[in-house]
Amino acid sequence: MLIKEKSKSLFEKAKNLIPGGVNSPVRAFKAVGGDPLFIKAAKGAYLYDEDGNKFIELINSWGPMILGHARDEIEKAVSESLKLSPSFGAPTENEINVAELIVEMVPSIEKVRMVNSGTEATMSAIRLARGFTGRDKIIKFEGCYHGHGDSFLIAAGSGVATMGTPDSPGVTKGTAADTLTAPYNNLEAVDKLIQNNKREIAAIIIEPVAGNMGCVLPGKGYLEGLRKACDENDILLIFDEVMTGFRLAKGGAQEVFNVMPDLTTLGKIIGGGMPVGAYGGKKEIMDHISPIGPVYQAGTLSGNPIAMSAGFEMLSYLNQHNEVYTQLQEVATKIENGIKDNLHQLGMSYSINSIGSMMTLFFTEEKVTNFDSAKTTDTALFGKYFNAMLENGVYIAPSQFESLFLSTSIDEKLADQIIDANFKSLKSIL
Ligand code: KE4
């Protein structure tokens, strides 16, 4: 059994000062039982908690640490930048360097604005779409999560689904009325919403590969169908690539599926672990953003030097080393096949969705193609599996409605250890 004394006492202290003892709900282990582990350090593929336990890490800060933890180049760049003062609130050259890389790497982006989180990116993109089109409504998809902006806490995934409150109190009726929802992978439902709300819909926002109901892939022709529906009805298509951006490919899901959105939101990997979000797209749309256009959006620490120094190192490396993506795919395929063998050996027929370095083992025998099928999973069994994996030295997302994120620090040897831990954990919950 894991020793968790230090984490336990820290959690008791934290709960007196921070709601639920955490600064983001999904970290609280509420859905899997037990108390959260307080992490002290991480390096490469490993996390070390306050009780000295060591884990192979498959969350990677929910995506950002695609090159593993505490990478030397990023550390060096941040410490250099720190000496020049962390923030000026004035333009700096490195913001241009990072913007240049994003424009080069993400096919549909011609101009980009930095913000401080994925939530800020999606909130800003929606405001821009409404300002640009003069329309109020948006379409989002059940089980997709776009951060905690009011317009998105309707049928949301990730932590909200994990907590079982996909529609959060505090979101006004007016706001909720402007957010229309449809099941993922269902084009007819989108067509129906468009017909019933003619010329009132500003944008359709989607995770082109969903990660927040667990990993769910777009069906054949689905993204193309959304693109067509938007073109025919003057609706902006927004790809929320906060998770998939720079992870599935240099150019994210839009490069993999070759479907171009009008706006893209980004986060996570850009900052290499520092708080960075961004939204970008066609010049003619982005030039509606203040100070060049009327749609207001701002941020004291947006594009700050420390985050830009980390981001520049991260994006430069990914831009120069495309082999990262084949390496991640090879290791992910090995792990997926190993888990499938384990399930077969144990006579279990749970389903797995995976693409690139994103993957989810669903505790259901149904193929998971949308939020309804994702909700057929046995979340109590997942909780047992999660805790068994911890005991077997592997740290996975503490929720069935999340994806795993591999890093390049996970090599074939570690993949074997993960497969072995998976076997032992599945066996223990049989
Ligand atoms: P942040 O505001 O958490 O930086 O980004 C919000 C966001 C937007 N869009 C997508 C597709 C996202 O996945 C996220 C955030 N992802 C979750 C994990 N599924 C963050 C983890 C957390 O809430 O602590």
Image (cartoon, helix red, strand yellow):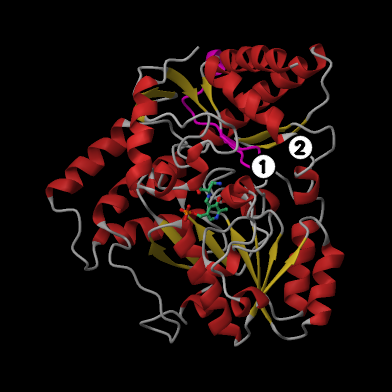
Q: Is residue 324 or residue 11 the one in the foreground?
A: 11
Q: Main secondary structure of the magenta part?
A: loop
- The kind of secondary structure element at disc 2 is loop
Query: Which comes sooner in the sequence, label 1 or label 2?
Result: 1
- The stretch drawn in magenta includes residue 159: no
Can I make out residue 42 in this image?
no
Instruction: Report whether 233 appears left or right of 329.
Output: right
- The stretch drawn in magenta includes residue 402: yes
Q: Amino acid at mark 1?
A: Gly
In this figure, which residue is indicated by the disc labeled 2? 377
**Where residue 386 sits: x, y (%)?**
60, 26
- The answer to which quarter of the image holds residue 225 is bottom right
Residue at x 73% of width, y 46% of height: 217
Q: How many marks?
A: 2
In this figure, which residue is indicated by the disc labeled 1? 214
> Is residue 133 depicted above or below 53 in this figure?
below
Cβ–Cβ under 8 Å for marks 1 and 2: yes
Residue at x 30% of width, y 35% of height: 73
- The answer to which quarter of the image holds residue 41 is top left
Segment colored magenta: 397-413
Tell me if mark 2 has few (under 14), some (14-19) or many (20+) residues whose alpha carbon lies within 10 angstroms of its own: many
**Where residue 52 sits: x, y (%)?**
35, 17
- The answer to which quarter of the image holds residue 429 is top right
- The kind of secondary structure element at disc 1 is loop
**Where residue 87 sits: x, y (%)?**
20, 58
Q: Amino acid at mark 2?
A: Thr
> Is residue 190 depicted above or below 377 in this figure?
below
